[in-house]
Amino acid sequence: MPFKPRILALLVAFSLQQAKAQQYVKDIYHDKIPVDYTGKLRDAYEFKDAAGLHLYIVSKFEQEKPTNKVSIFGTGYTLVNGAFVKDWSITDFSGLDVLLKYNYTKVIDIDRDGIYETIFVYELDPNDGMGSTWKLMLHYKNKKYVLRVHVPSEDDDNYNVQLDKTFDALPKSVKKYVIDYWNAIADELDLKGRYDIK
Amino acid sequence: MILNDHPKPQNMYYKFILIFLIACIAQKANAQMYVKNILNDKIPVSYKGKPIDAYEYQDGAGLHIYLVTKTKQDRPAQKVTITGACYTQTNGIFVKDWSITDFAFNILLYNINTKIVDIDNDGIYETVFVYQLNPDAAPGADWKMMLHYKNQKYLVRAHVAGFTMNNGSLERDKGFDTLPAAIKNYTIDYWNDIADRNELGLSFSK
């Protein structure tokens, strides 16, 4: 190869690498959050993909009156014309507590289409005598897919694992990833609430 | 060799390329200290159980391996053991610098919280890892945060109360007071951050 094309090839390779590096995921929990949220911040990521610059934010709000109520808010945003616009949001609540398992949050491009999926996991009513409920939330192209698991704390209660029916409409790789991921969490935490593919 | 193909460089273009390449090499030299996650790679030391956290890292003291493994025993009683160890390459083989073992009904290592970081900028990495003993157990869970500074262990212990009428507690090894202030402060801040994010309600006052 003559010298000049070689240099060109080098530069092209270099710029390709740069283009690839434009996709990123950054934990911004300790940074200034560029959107409003209710209550206390529990999880925050900024990420960039083929669809633009996004935020994923989870916050928690504890209300004591008139009754004790703990709410969790999860929201996805995209930057449009300089302002973050909401893509999706979820709310859940409990009379006892809601714990976000931030260690299990994933911002990941499962099906390699250049657009990130988000997964977060939380537990409703932890340390309750009646057992607790775990939820794993996948957002795929701004649509919600939920895996719900009831974990009993007494012997006369049963495990119950449910997958939204809409999971069947997802690409196979995404559905499989979510089930495998949940089962890995259940194993790690010794929850025994695995989801068996029928 | 390349330049011989073109004895007369036509313009300044090539000089720029040379400068660019030299800059690249300089950056590499600077990157001699590194930390690399090797959990999914072949781990160059022998171990028992399943690797759950593994890093290779290089610093002023050489090339090191940090490895945590987990072993599950179902009989006669359920027992989970974790072993954390650190090695330094000496004459081509990895020699153990330190190791710790802990066991419980279940143990959860939070590898998202593992840090291999040069807190005091002395060219030698510190390691910090965090695990929870007996998560979701009725009497409550115990958390431990292990700092290794120059192969010496410094421990933060927290007991998070469960159903029963016991109280939460938080303590740290007295050895922390002998550490450089930067290291002690970093560790305390880091614990407080973990306590906040896991909603443990057990943090050190400063």
Image: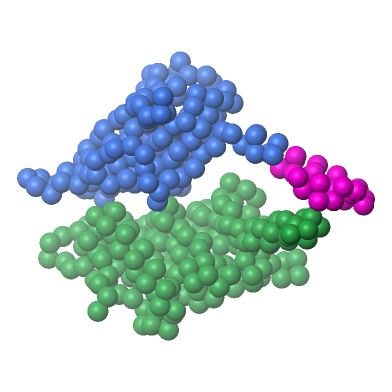
Chain colours: A green, B blue
The residue depicted at 31 percent of the width and 56 percent of the height is A126
Residue A126 appears left or right of B180: left
Q: Residue furthest left?
A: B76
Provide residue A52's location: percent of width, then percent of height: 66, 68
Q: Main secondary structure of the magenta part?
A: helix
Provide residue B76's location: percent of width, then percent of height: 7, 45
Residue B108 appears left or right of A17: left
User: B77 or A3: which is nearer to us?
Assistant: A3
The residue depicted at 42 percent of the width and 84 percent of the height is A169
In this rendering, is residue B75 above or below A120? Answer: above
Provide residue B152's location: percent of width, then percent of height: 39, 21
Provide residue A20's location: percent of width, then percent of height: 64, 61
Count of labels in the image: 0
Can residue A19 be found in the magenta stretch? no
Quadrant of the drawing holding the C terminus of chain A: bottom left
Quarter of the figure with residue B122: top right
**Extent of the magenta region:** B1-24
Can residue B10 be found in the magenta stretch? yes
Residue B163 appears left or right of B130: left
Quarter of the figure with residue A160: bottom left
